[in-house]
Amino acid sequence: FTAPGTGWLAKLGPPGALAVGLLKVAGVGAARRGPELPQVAGSLAAGDAIFLPLYDHFLKHGGVFRLNLGPKSFVIVSDPDIAKHIPRDNSKAYSKGILAEILEFVMGTGLIPADGEVWRVRRRAIVPSLHQKFVTEMIGLFGKASDRLCQKLDKAALDGADVEMESLFSRLTLDVIGKAVFNYDFDSLSYDNGMVEAAYVTLREAEMRSTAPIPTWKIPIWKDISPRQRKVNEALVLINNVLDELISTCKRMVDEEDLQFHEEYMNEQDPSILRFLLASGEDVSSKQLRDDLMTMLIAGHETSAAVLTWTFYLLSKCPKVMSKLQAEVDDVLGDGLPTIEDVKKLKYTTRVINESLRLYPQPPVLIRRSLEDDMLGEYPIGRGEDIFISIWNLHRCPKHWDDADVFSPERWPLDGPNPNETNQKFSYLPFGGGPRKCVGDMFATFENVVATAMLVKRFDFQMAPGPPLVEMTTGATIHTTKGLNMTVSRRTKPPVIPI
Ligand code: HEM
């Protein structure tokens, strides 16, 4: 789930150009079956948003090439047909490779890093839990959490203080996902408690591990004495204990309830995914359940926070889009919290989110490793290749998109279908594609639509005067380097939202 940084180099599988040349001379493996991939020599600096140099290489060398970084190499894919081939048409020939290795400490064998039989069984168990009735129910949760954020912003608007929106969005989406996945109220918008801190320590560690030049956490003595690693271990113990507690309490509740399990099972008091998974009666270990919950917590938290951050950044740069958005929201939303009917009518708001995901895909790169020899278009590749499918490049390809870098929700007709990888022929794949496509796409879209609509109905947002330029850095998702500082002001006719 993480975009690669320099730290990946130490773990990348296949050899660089020199060794590929030697293999070719020896006539072994992939080198025999077609032309060699275009070769590009590269270098990366720690902390860089690495998808940016990959974009320049793509314009120069085309939709598939090999990037050699010293003794290691990896294959960069920016061609829609090959982006369809790897995750969809020939998905069985690829694993999550390096991603699974890096995330193992926190996600174990959860759905994102899992491969093979574990993935197949867990995917079959988890997908049904996000049924339509559940996602519809979640709209109330999105509304309540967004309302809490509105109240926080009310105060900032009154005080005239600038607000750092990226961290507020991160808190909003943490509150939402904790409640939705395992019925836990982080309440991080109101105050910091041990669990909020532990969640952030763990998330930052996952990001650090994906970009660190040296895997210090693997060095035997260092990993025990480093204060950072100790803090990570303590955070993991705390989260695991809380999750174990939630799982056993939920098990008891399920045992006591009369409700029959069925396709759209949902307990009104606790509609969480955990409740569904336990009520389904599947034989699953507590450790596996914990891994699955942790995976969904991370998958659903950082992604949505990043989508909201970049959506508000884009809106602040495009007053015309903002006015149109506010006109729709004023028209559709009443005084109460949004309902599913409202969300369906928020068509332009949805297009704003679609377009924000085009320009700032989260994550910007998908990661795979080949399990066998394969052909990428005309190019043969061998087993063990580490591959990065650049969603960033696909979404900004100047051949495919008119004004590729322009934020234009109008490019998606309001009465047309919701854009996805299938109807956009893999030139647009914000939620991936094929068997490993995101399980939370609908959930996340509604969450972002509700939050955006409620915020722009109540407030105007502008970039704070004189803040540092908003720049990007690579983590699991695209972060700003120094936060998104905004000036928030109440709109002239504030709506009354009952609390
Ligand atoms: C997978 C994007 C929200 C759970 C993915 C993938 C993408 C993605 C691109 C495919 C990864 C790959 O093929 O390597 C997003 C975006 C989100 C979002 C942009 C928000 C805007 C969520 C939410 C949840 C979730 C809210 C949970 C409720 C998952 C899981 C997978 C996944 C479990 C792994 C599926 C598998 O491997 O079978 N997501 N996601 N995501 N997502 Fe999301």
Image: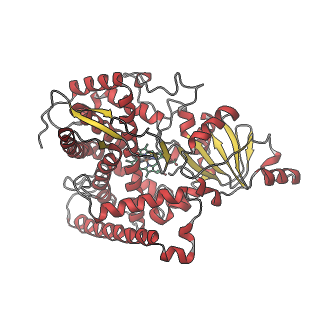
- Residue in the image at 36% along x and 30% along y: 315
**Residue 381: percent from the left, percent from the top?**
73, 47
Q: Is residue 382 above or below residue 106?
A: above
Quarter of the rendering containing residue 483: top left
Q: Is residue 86 above or below residue 494?
A: below
**Residue 153: percent from the left, percent from the top?**
22, 42
How many numbered marks, from 0 up? 0
**Residue 127: percent from the left, percent from the top?**
40, 50
**Residue 41: percent from the left, percent from the top?**
72, 45
Quarter of the image for the C terminus: give it: top left
Q: Is residue 467 left or right of residue 450?
A: right
- Residue in the image at 49% along x and 29% along y: 423
Q: Residue furthest front?
A: 466
Q: How is the image coloured?
A: secondary structure
Q: Can residue 450 be seen by looking at this rendering?
A: yes
Q: Can residue 426 be seen by looking at this rendering?
A: no
Quarter of the rendering containing residue 122: bottom left
- Residue in the image at 80% along x and 40% along y: 35
